[in-house]
Amino acid sequence: MNLRKHIIPRWGKEIATAIEPRQVKQWLRELKHTEKLANGTLARQRRIMSLVFKTAQLDGLISRDEGSNPLKLVRCATTSDFQATVITPRQAWEIWCRLEQPESTLVLLITATGLRIGEALGLKWSDIDSTGEQIHVSRCWTASRLSRTKSQASRAAVPMNSVLAVHLQEWRRQSPYASDADWIFPSMKNKGRTPRQGGMIGTDHLRKAAIAAGVIKPGEALGMHSLRHSLATYLVSQGCDPKTVQGMLRHSNVHTTLQLYSHGRSQDRLDAQGTMLDAFFTPQEATVQIAPHPDHG
């Protein structure tokens, strides 16, 4: 995808040995400002392009000396410049109360599990394992396209607390697309053939509900990814083992989550999710609260 979308359109007709490091640096700068790509995505473009040069060297298509790979001299920031708005479980509950279906179930799902929005939208009902108390993550829906999950670690099963399971099942009873092969969060405009669009949910529903709840002010930002950051922040602040938090968020390596070494057990992750849901519904009782289903895509 990165090759087709960014690298080939810019470099596909260039002579490899004529590409200068300064040209690559300028190209990455343009991607950052025109395409609004995050640092991590820019670093990925650099790694892929460098791999292309290394493969060409391995196959003897270009010289194997170090100077033949211009990416060797190009540096790229890898730290994300995303600034999340972190909210408390109580604030998340206030937002959730102001959402209708299916946005309310989607927000509860991400708040409790830390799923990325694309992963949540890529779920089908067959991915819900009620017996095993798990949600299987195998695909991602972003930019109107299905793709694999971000990493091998992202494909780990996600624990499903019984409270969350009840809300998912209640939404399944309401949804017009409730067979195992259907999307959990289908686009009504596309008659269930595709999932919803994540960007629209964040701007048209989550942010408006947050403003109505007084969690943010008009003009301030709050996206679905902030719910993932909020989950991690809350669990760590409550003394939850950072390795358990790493397991819940399915980070690829330990350095992403506080640089610890032991692995959290599945039961630990299930308990941690229960901690979040207890705080989410307190002081209210953890009962199913279902709003009428609106017919929108």
Image (cartoon, rainbow, N blue to C red):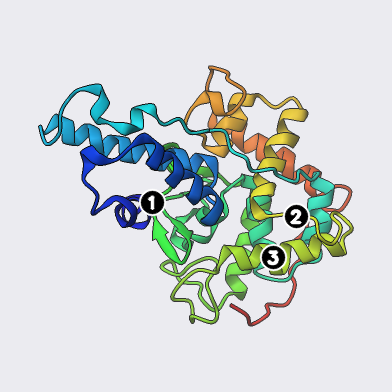
Q: Please, what is the three-letter code of the amino acid marked with disc 2?
A: Ala
Q: Please, what is the three-letter code of the amino acid marked with disc 3?
A: Thr
Disc number for residue 148? 1
Above or below for 261 versus 63: above
Q: Please, what is the three-letter code of the amino acid marked with disc 1?
A: Arg
Disc number for residue 49? none
Question: Badges 2 and 1: C-beta atoms under 8 Å apart?
Answer: no
Q: Nearer the viewer, residue 112 or 60?
A: 60
Find numbered disc 2 in the image and state the secondary structure of the residue it sits on.
loop
Judging by the rendered image, the residue that carries numbered circle 3 is: 203
* Residue 83 horizontal/vertical position (percent): 69, 43
Find numbered disc 1 in the image and state the secondary structure of the residue it sits on.
loop
Give the residue displayed 53% in from the left and 24% down from the top: 254
Find numbered disc 3 in the image and state the secondary structure of the residue it sits on.
helix
Sooner in the amino-acid sequence: mark 2 or mark 3 = 3
* Residue 297 horizontal/vertical position (percent): 58, 77
Give the residue displayed 29% in from the left and 53% down from the top: 8
* Residue 271 horizontal/vertical position (percent): 66, 35
Q: Nearer the viewer, residue 87 or 69?
A: 69
Q: Could you tell whether 129 is left or right of 14 in the image?
A: right
